[in-house]
Amino acid sequence: MPLARIDLIRGKSESYRQAIGEAVYQALLSIGVPEDDRFQVIHEHEPANFIFANSYLGVQHTDDLVIIQITFNEGRTTVQKQALYKAIAEGIHTATGLGIGDVFINLVEVKRENWSFGNGVAQYAST
């Protein structure tokens, strides 16, 4: 059910981008997302089209910043979300060497009926 949108400045290798995607997926599995429930879009941007604060809330960002937005079903606790943030940041750092300060994460929670995985059917909607 999660849809992960991963954005970064153009120029990183395919293996680097794939490692980020894998780290996000593994972190989602760690909080109970079902196996094979993997939907990700990785998008590279020209530097002029990737605008961010160099420092915000005491966190420093570099040109290696990765912005991750995950849309998934509502209902997870704050503790689960915090565990997800940590698992993503640490997983990306381990896989790529990217500093954890350069991992920006935003969660968007939606109701279960807001998904269609194909065939024009809302598979999670209760009837």
Image: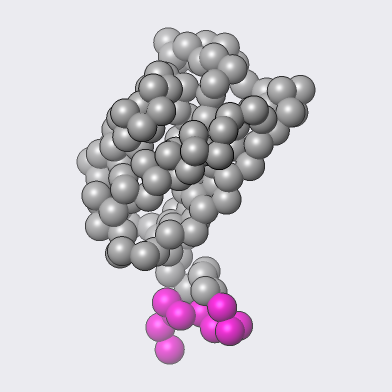
Residue 45 covered by magenta stretch: no
Point 76% across, 22% down: residue: 48
One can see residue 119 in this view: yes
Instruction: Report whether 8 appears left or right of 105.
Output: right
One can see residue 77 in this view: no
Can you say which quadrant of the picture contains the C terminus? bottom left
Instruction: Report whether 25 appears left or right of 68.
Output: left
Image location of residue 86, percent across then percent down:
29, 33
Q: Is residue 28 above or below residue 97?
A: below
Image location of residue 12, percent across then percent down:
58, 29
Point 40% across, 46% down: residue: 22
Residue 124 covered by magenta stretch: yes
Point 47% across, 11% down: residue: 60
Image location of residue 68, percent across then percent down:
50, 39
Can you say which quadrant of the picture contains the N terminus? bottom left
**Magenta residues, as a range?**
118-127
**Where on the picture, by quarter, is residue 51?**
top right
